[in-house]
Image (cartoon, helix red, strand yellow):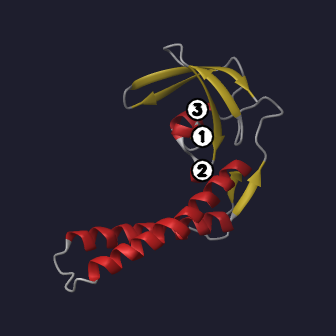
Amino acid sequence: MSTDRHVRLTADGQTRLQEELRELREEKLPALLERIRGTTANGDVNDNPEYEGTKEDLMNTEARIAELEQTLDRAEIIPEGSPDGIVGLGSHVTVRDDEDIEETWILVAPEEASTPDGRISTDSPVGQALMGRTANDSVTVTTPGGEITYQILAVA
């Protein structure tokens, strides 16, 4: 992957990733290093499952820190919203599904996607189906559980 490729983030997404990076650097990483010191203080670490698990967690944390640093270094901040009413990156989209459940999502780049937070990736099947659409359009998305049809109620 080219390191000069821009990552398009919303300002809120940038803030969320900066906070995650801060927590990893200032809280999780020091705690993991302390745990490793504690497990190695007793001598031999061969066949020590606590040490191996902590070491693996440390490697994963360091990899996530590097990933976040790279993402934030390449970030291009985009405005949220859709002044033209067409769904795109940064759009707030309100939909109603087949079961009459209404939800509002923000379409974001994969790097800041968080389904529990209502931040849907433009690369996801739902995100791809919504891109370029407008209010009153219907989209059908194939999921592992079957097809779901969404009625677009509003685009902002």
What's the CA distance linking mark 3 and mark 1? Answer: 15 Å
Q: Residue at the spot x=70%, y=42% of the render?
A: 89
Mark 2 surroundings within 10 Å by alpha-carbon count, few (fewer than 14), some (14 through 19), many (20 or more):
many
State the image quarter where residue 82 is shown: top right
Residue holding disc 3: 129
Q: Is residue 64 visible?
A: no
Q: Earlier in the sequence, mark 2 or mark 3?
A: 2
Residue assigned mark 2: 112
Label located before the other in sequence (1 or 2): 2
Whether residue 88 is visible here, answered yes or no, is yes
Please provide percent x and percent y for residue 60.
41, 67
Which residue type carries mark 2?
Answer: Glu
Task: Indicate which label's residue lies in the foreground, 3 or 1.
Answer: 1
Callout 1 touching callout 2 (CB < 8 Å): yes
Instruction: In the displayed orientation, state which residue is furthest to the bottom.
Output: 43
Picture quarter containing residue 31? Answer: bottom left
Which disc is residue 119 wearing? 1
The secondary structure type at the circle numbered 1 is strand
Residue type, numbered disc 1: Arg
Residue at image point 73% right, 51% down: 11
Please name the amino acid that badge 3 sits on. Answer: Ala
